[in-house]
Image (tube, rainbow, N blue to C red):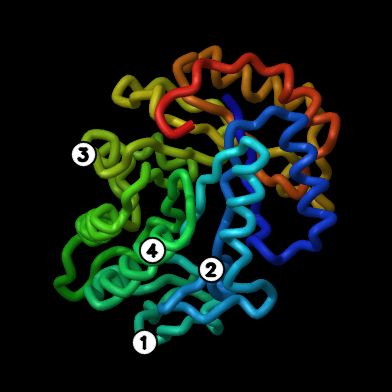
């Protein structure tokens, strides 16, 4: 089973480009598409909590999901919960964390009012769109605890539990695979604990074109691995060959053959040659929501 990560929020692209990408995804035989639904400019659905993204519309996300479903592709919506790309567009600037380095933008995970607001936003979104699953991105605190605050991993875990309470579909994380090797939490990211606690139904790790070391505590049958489709961080970025992405996938699956699916990021760099290669990947049996 394989998938793609679409980084362009629904409604941002011309219809012709959306259909071009959909054609590649169908050619590749993907089971699902992971789509970023809010890049910090506002909602792409009918939200009572966040203004609409002026580049998009309130109907963009439901229309995208309907289009995917009508073509036999399921949708994993990627919801940025703590970090944000564009703080100037935040509808609740009073919840922003102050004192961070330039370029680092996070909400205050220690603020219970923020957590309640974000959870309500997430719950409303999932109630209004027909998503097959949701993945929580930017699950980190932005800094460690100060001035008597509870440890960052405790604050992040409490927030995840609050999000869990409003989610009625499978819930995944979206985390860099580099954190798999950490033995201690960093800014609230505690992957080992997340695996053992039942906080998430399944897991998604990007940067997975770099093979992970052996970690017997991981249940790989619940893991979706996300590799790159282009040579990052060279400038300008150029798509990798179908052979290269196949070899990257193969290196990971030889080590961990029970991994549930492998995907490529980002869909906007996908080529027909990559789609041709992906179509030849052998799929495992489809389980649960995909």
Q: Nearer the viewer, residue 140 or 93?
A: 93
**Which residue is rendered at x = 65% and y = 54% of the image?**
7
Look at 64% across and 61% down and name the residue there. 9
Question: Could you tell me how far apart the alpha carbons at marks 2 and 3 are, in whole angstroms?
Answer: 31 Å
Q: Image quarter for residue 72? A: top right
Mark 1 closeness class: few <14, some 14–19, many ≥20 residues within 10 Å? few
The Cα–Cα distance between marks 2 and 4, rounded to whole angstroms, is: 11 Å
Q: Judging from the image, what secondary structure is the residue with disc 3 in? A: helix
Q: CA distance from mark 3 to mark 4?
A: 22 Å
Quadrant location of the N terminus? top right
Q: Position of residue 109 (x, y in %)?
A: 30, 68
Secondary element at tag 4: helix
When the figure is inspected, residue 218 is found, relative to residue 146, above or below; the finding is: above
First in sequence: mark 1 or mark 3?
1
Residue 122 is labelled as: 4
| Mark 2 surroundings within 10 Å by alpha-carbon count, few (fewer than 14), some (14 through 19), many (20 or more) | many
> In the image, which disc is placed on residue 94?
1
* Residue with the mark numbered 2: 45
Report x, y in % for residue 284: 53, 16
Could you tell whether 117 is left or right of 214 in the image? left
**Residue carrying label 3:** 197
């Amino acid at each position: 089973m394989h998938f793609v990560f679409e980084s362009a929020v629904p409604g941002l692209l011309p219809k012709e480009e959306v259909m071009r990408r959909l054609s590649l995804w169908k050619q590749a035989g993907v089971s699902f598409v992971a789509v970023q639904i809010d890049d910090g400019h506002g909602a792409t659905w009918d939200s009572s909590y966040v203004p609409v993204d002026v580049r998009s519309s309130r109907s963009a996300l439901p229309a995208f999901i309907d289009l995917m479903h009508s073509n036999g592709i399921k949708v994993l919506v990627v919801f940025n919960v703590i970090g944000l790309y564009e703080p100037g567009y935040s509808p609740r600037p009073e919840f922003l964390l102050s004192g961070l380095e330039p370029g680092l933008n996070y909400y205050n995970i220690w603020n219970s009012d923020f957590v309640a607001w974000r959870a309500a936003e997430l719950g409303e979104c999932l109630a209004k769109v027909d998503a097959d699953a949701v993945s929580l991105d930017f699950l980190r605190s932005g800094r460690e605890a100060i001035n008597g605050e509870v440890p960052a991993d405790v604050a992040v875990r409490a927030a995840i539990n609050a999000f869990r309470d409003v989610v009625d579909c499978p819930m995944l994380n979206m985390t860099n695979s580099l954190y798999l090797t950490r033995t201690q939490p960093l800014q609230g990211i505690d992957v080992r604990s997340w695996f053992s606690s039942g906080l998430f139904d399944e897991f998604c790790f990007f940067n997975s074109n770099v093979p992970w070391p052996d970690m017997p505590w991981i249940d790989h049958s619940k893991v979706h691995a996300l590799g790159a489709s282009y040579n990052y961080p060279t400038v300008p970025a150029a798509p990798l060959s179908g052979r290269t992405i196949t070899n990257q996938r193969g290196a990971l699956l030889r080590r961990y053959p029970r991994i549930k699916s492998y995907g490529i990021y980002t869909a906007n760099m996908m080529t027909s040659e990559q789609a041709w290669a992906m179509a030849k990947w052998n799929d495992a049996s489809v389980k649960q929501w995909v």
